[in-house]
C-alpha cells in the first residue's frame, strides 16, 4: 500500500479537472486521472508525469456502472485504498435551456452525469475511502446551483442565464451531498462542495473570466482540509456560498 496520499479526480483529462490533478500532484500525491477518452487520458497522464507528478490513468465513464466498478478495482490494485475523491466530471447539456423549450432528454442526460454519476462513483469508491486515515470527498458544483442566488434580485449576475438542466443539476448535486453528509456523520470522511467560479473552459465555450488553475484552487483547498476541517458546506474562493 502506497505511503503517498492517493486521489482520484474525475474528468481530469482537461480544464479544471486537469489542474486539480496537477495541483494535488504537486503536493507529492499519487493521482488517478479519471477520464473516459483513452487518448486524452493518456495524454494528460504523460503531461502530469513530465511535470513530476506520480499519475496513473483510470478509465472512467461516470454514466456507466461497470466503468465505476472497474475503476474502483483498478485503484485497489494500484494503491489499496483511496484518500481523496474529487467528483469533477460534468456536462452542461448545451445552451439555451429555457424550461419552456428544453428537451426533457437533455435534463435527463445532464442529471445522469452531474448527479447520478457522482453517486455512482462515490458509492464505488467508498469502501476504498473507508480505508484511509483522512478521507475527503470534494463535489465540484457551481454557484448557479444556489437557490438563494437563483431567487435573488440579481440572479442573472449571481446565477447565470436561465437554465433548466445545468443549474438544477448542481442544485440536485448540492442536495445529494448533504444526504451523504447526514448518512456518514460520525465518520472521519469530510464531504464538501466547491464552486470554481466562472472559468474559461470548453464547458462554456471559453467565455469564463477565470483560469482553470484559479478554478482548481477551491478543490485543492477542500481536498487538503485538516481533520478538524468543515464538512457539509458549500465554498468558493471568497468563502461560504449560500445554499
Image: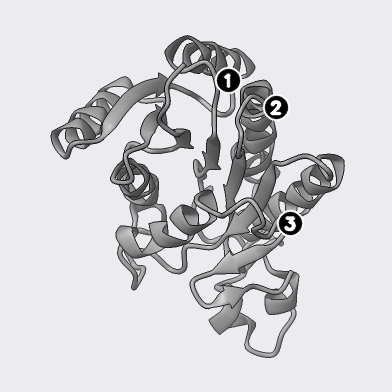
Q: Nearer the viewer, residue 95 or 17?
A: 17
Tag 3 residue: 232
What color scheme is it?
one colour
First-in-chain label (2 vs 1)? 1
Mark 2 to mark 1 CA distance (whole Å): 9 Å
Label 3: element kind: loop
Q: Residues within 10 Å of mark 2 (few under 14, many from 20)?
A: some
Q: Do callouts 2 and 1 mark residues in contact (Cβ within 8 Å)?
A: yes
Report the side of 175 relative to 162 (left or right): right
What label sits on residue 68 in the rendered view?
1
Q: Earlier in the sequence, mark 3 or mark 2?
A: 2
- Using the rendered image of the protein, determine whether residue 92 is visible from the camera's viewpoint: no
Q: Quadrant of the C terminus?
A: bottom right
Tell me the distance, in whole angstroms, between the alpha carbons under discs 3 and 2.
17 Å
Task: Name the residue: 48% across, 58% down.
Answer: 221
Circle 2 or circle 1, nearest the eye: 2
State left or right for residue 219 relative to residue 210: right
Which residue is rendered at x = 45% and y = 37% of the image? 9
| Tag nearer the camera, 3 or 2 | 3
* Residue found farthest to the bottom: 153
Quickly name the residue at label 2. 123
Amino acid at each position: 500500500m502506497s505511503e503517498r496520499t492517493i486521489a482520484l479526480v474525475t474528468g481530469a483529462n482537461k480544464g479544471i479537472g486537469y489542474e486539480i490533478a496537477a495541483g494535488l500532484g504537486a503536493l507529492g500525491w499519487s493521482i488517478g486521472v479519471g477520464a473516459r477518452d483513452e487518448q486524452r487520458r493518456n495524454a494528460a497522464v504523460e503531461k502530469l508525469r513530465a511535470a513530476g507528478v506520480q499519475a496513473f490513468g483510470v478509465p472512467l465513464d461516470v454514466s456507466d456502472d461497470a466503468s465505476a466498478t472497474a475503476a474502483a478495482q483498478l485503484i485497489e490494485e494500484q494503491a489499496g485504498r483511496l484518500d481523496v475523491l474529487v467528483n469533477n466530471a460534468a456536462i452542461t447539456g448545451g445552451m439555451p435551456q429555457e424550461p419552456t423549450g428544453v428537451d426533457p432528454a437533455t435534463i435527463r442526460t445532464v442529471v445522469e452525469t452531474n448527479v447520478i454519476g457522482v453517486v455512482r462513483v462515490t458509492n464505488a469508491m467508498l469502501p476504498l475511502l473507508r480505508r484511509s486515515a483522512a478521507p475527503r470527498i470534494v463535489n465540484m458544483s457551481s454557484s448557479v446551483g444556489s437557490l438563494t442566488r437563483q431567487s435573488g434580485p440579481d440572479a442573472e449576475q449571481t446565477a447565470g442565464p436561465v437554465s433548466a438542466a445545468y443549474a438544477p443539476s448542481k442544485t440536485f448535486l448540492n442536495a445529494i451531498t448533504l444526504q451523504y453528509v447526514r448518512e456518514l456523520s460520525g465518520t472521519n470522511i469530510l464531504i464538501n462542495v466547491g464552486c470554481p467560479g466562472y472559468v474559461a473552459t470548453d464547458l462554456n465555450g471559453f467565455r469564463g473570466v477565470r483560469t482553470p488553475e484559479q478554478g482548481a484552487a477551491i478543490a485543492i483547498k477542500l481536498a487538503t482540509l485538516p481533520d478538524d476541517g468543515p464538512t457539509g458546506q458549500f465554498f468558493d474562493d471568497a468563502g461560504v456560498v449560500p445554499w
